[in-house]
Amino acid sequence: MYSRERGRRMHSEHESVEHGSAKPGLRYSVSDWDTSNKQISDTAEHRRHMSHMTRQEGRALRNETTSKTNWDKSDSSRRLSDRIWDISRWRETLESCIQEVEKEMDALTLGKEETERALTATAVPLEVTVECLTLREGRRGNELVSDPVEAQLKKEVEMIDGAQRVFQQGIDKAFEQLCLLQVSRQQLTHDLQNKIEAQDIDLSCLSITVTSPKISLKPNPLRIPIGSTTPQQWEQFSQYNVDRAQEEMQASLQLREDMSVTRVQLQNELDAQRIATVFAIRKRTHHLEQARNETQWQMKSSQDEISDMERDIRSLEDDLQAKMAPLKLVHTRLENRTKRPGVDLCRDEVQYGLVDEANQLEATILALKQKLAQAQYALQALQLHQAHMEEDLSHKKDALFLEQRSLETRGRLASAAFTDVSSGAVVPLTNSSGRHNLELA
C-alpha cells in the first residue's frame, strides 16, 4: 500500500511538471521513511533466513542421497557377485552332465556295432538298388514304362527290406535313443551357452563403474523385458534339463544291456535276385539298342526323302518363277494390242491365240502353285515327324544311357564282399536303420 501511495505522489508531481505548474512536489514524512527502511530490512532478513534453511536442507539431502547411492551400488555389486557364483555353479553342473551324455552316446554307438555288422551285407545292395530305381525315374516320354527291370528292382528292394527287418527293432531303438540323447545334449548345450553369455554380461556389469566411458542414460531402463523369468523358474529349467538327461542316460544304459544280435545269411538269396535283375537290365538294354538302331535308320531314310523333297520344291519354285516372264509377255502383248485404232482393233487369230496362251499360262502357274503347296505340306509333315523321331531317339538314348548307368552302378555289388561282416565295418546310422531321411541333428 505504501508503494501504491508513493507511486500516486510521483505521478502527480510528474503531471505538475509537464503542465508547467510551479506547485512544489509532495514530501514523505519521516514515519513513512522509517517504515520503508524497516520493511526493506525485514524482507532482507527473511530472505536470508529462507536461503539458509534451503542450503541446510540441500546439504542434508546431498549427504543422505550420497550414502544411499553408495550403499545401493555396493549392494547391487554384491548381488551381481552372488549371481555370477550361482551361474558358475550351474555351468559346472551342465558341463559335467554334457560330458556324461557324450560318453553315453559313444557307449551306445559302440553297443550298436554288433547289430550293424549284420546289416553290412545288405546296406550296399539296398543303396545300389534304390539308386538304380532313382536313375530310371529320369526316363522321358514313351520310355517311362513299367518294365520287367523295374519289377525286378522293386522285388530286390522288398527282399532286402525283409531281411533287414530281423535286425531292425534293436537298431531302431538304439537310433531313437541316440536322437533323444542328442536332443538332451542340445538342450544342455543351449542352456550352457545362455549361462555363459549371461555370466559374461554380469561380469561386464560388475566391472563397469561410474567413471567408465561407456555408461549413458538409456530409454526406459526399468521396463520388464519380454520373456523374463523368476529365479525359481530359472533354476527349475536347468534342473529339468539335467534330470531329463539323467533319465535318457539311464534308458540308454538299459538299452545297451538288453541289446542282442541276430545274424542271418542272405548271400544266396540276394545273389540270385541280383543275377535276375542284371539279366533283366541287359535284356532291356538290348531291346533299347534295337529300337534305337531302327529309329536311326528311319531318320536317315526320312532325311534323304526330305532332301529330295527340298530339291523338288526348289525346282517347282524355279519353274514357277520361269513361267512369270512368258505370262508378263503375253499380258503385255494383249495390253499393247488394245491400243490399235479404229477397225484395226480386230479380234483376230492373234488375239485368240494370245488369250489362249494367257489362260494356259495361268492354269499352269495355278497347277504349279498347288503342287508346290502340296510338296511344302508333305515336307512340313516329314520335318515334323523327323523332329518327333529325333525327340524319340533322344529319349531312347537317354533311357539306354540310364540302363548302362544302372549296370555300372550295380557293378559295385561285385566288389561288395559279404565277408565284410566279420571285418568290423559299421553301417552308417542313416542306412542301417532303414530311415534314409532320418539323420542325427
Image (cartoon, rainbow, N blue to C red):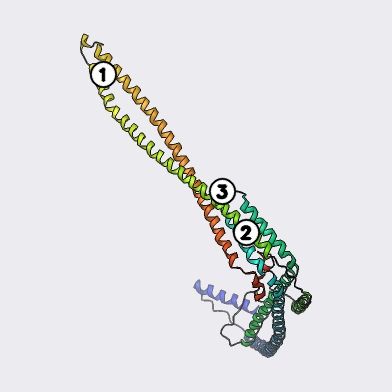
Q: Which amino acid does the dot numbered 3 rest on?
A: Glu
Query: Residue 85, how many percent across, how many down?
Result: 70, 87
Determine whether the residue tagged by mark 3 lies in a helix, strand or loop.
helix
Which of discs 3 and 2 lies nearer the camera? The answer is: 2
Q: Residue 334, which numbered label?
A: 1
Quarter of the rendering containing residue 237: bottom right
Q: Is 161 left or right of 210, judged from the image as shown?
A: right
Q: Earlier in the sequence, mark 2 or mark 1?
A: 2
Quadrant in the picture for the N terminus: bottom right
Residue that label 2 marks = 275
Foreground of the two, 222 or 418: 418
Q: Residue 359, which numbered label?
A: none
Which of discs 2 and 1 lies nearer the camera? The answer is: 2
Determine whether the residue tagged by mark 1 lies in a helix, strand or loop.
helix
Residue at 52% over, 53% down: 398
Few, some or many residues within 10 Å of mark 2 (<14, 14–19, 20+): few
Q: Residue 143, which numbered label?
A: 3
Few, some or many residues within 10 Å of mark 3 (<14, 14–19, 20+): some
> 46 above or below 106?
below
Q: Which amino acid does the dot numbered 1 rest on?
A: Leu
Which of discs 1 and 3 lies nearer the camera? The answer is: 3
> 163 above or below 138?
below
Answer whether labels 3 and 2 touch (C-beta < 8 Å): no
Query: Residue 82, how many percent across, how many down?
Result: 72, 87
Foreground of the two, 14 or 243: 243
Quadrant in the picture for the C terminus: bottom right
Few, some or many residues within 10 Å of mark 1 (<14, 14–19, 20+): some
